Image: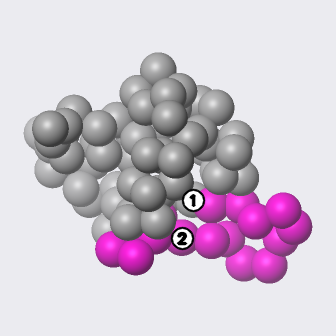
Amino acid sequence: MATMKNVVLPILEEISTGDGTRMELHDRCKDIIASWSQFKRIFSSLLAEGLIARKDVSWPDQFAITEEGREVVQSFAG
């Protein structure tokens, strides 16, 4: 089973490089997790935990890493 450090952390690192729609973020993370359904499950978990969030009001929905998400990335980097 994949660990947070092997899957979630690389996804958070990629999201931290720039905002995007859920599909754009998946396209950027395909080398980490190719399955769209698995990505959506992990993405929903990251939203629920407050590590990523919808940006204000935009269409289509844009997502960005939160301050809490940045702290997780930094805690593993250092």
Residue 2 image offset from top left, x and y in percent: 19, 37
In terms of secondary structure, where does tag 2 sit? Answer: strand
Segment tinted magenta in the rendering: 47-63
- Give the prevailing secondary structure in the magenta stretch: loop
Residue 17 image offset from top left, x and y in percent: 53, 39
Q: Is residue 30 above or below residue 26?
A: above
Q: Describe residue 46's horizontal placement relative to residue 73 as left or right.
A: right
The alpha-carbon separation of the residues under discs 2 and 1 comes to 6 Å
In the image, 16 versus 61, the foreground residue is 61
Q: Which mark is residue 39?
A: none
Point 39% across, 63% down: residue: 46
| Position of the N terminus by quadrant | top left
Q: Is residue 37 visible?
A: yes
In the image, 74 versus 2, the foreground residue is 2
- Residue placed under numbered mark 1 in the picture: 64
Q: Residues within 10 Å of mark 2 (few under 14, many from 20)?
A: some
Point 62% across, 71% down: residue: 54
Residue 60 falls in image quadrant: bottom right
Hey, which residue is sitting farthest right in the picture? Answer: 59
Residue 7 falls in image quadrant: top left
Task: Please report contact status of discs 2 and 1: CB closer than 8 Å, yes or no.
Answer: yes
Type of amino acid under label 2: Ala
Q: Earlier in the sequence, mark 2 or mark 1?
A: 2
Type of amino acid under label 1: Ala
In terms of secondary structure, where does tag 1 sit? Answer: strand
Q: Describe residue 59's horizontal placement relative to residue 18 as left or right.
A: right
- Residue placed under numbered mark 2 in the picture: 53
Q: Is residue 68 above or below residue 37?
A: below
Q: Is residue 40 above or below residue 36?
A: below
Q: Describe residue 14's horizontal placement relative to residue 7 as left or right.
A: right
Q: Describe residue 54's horizontal placement relative to residue 14 as left or right.
A: right
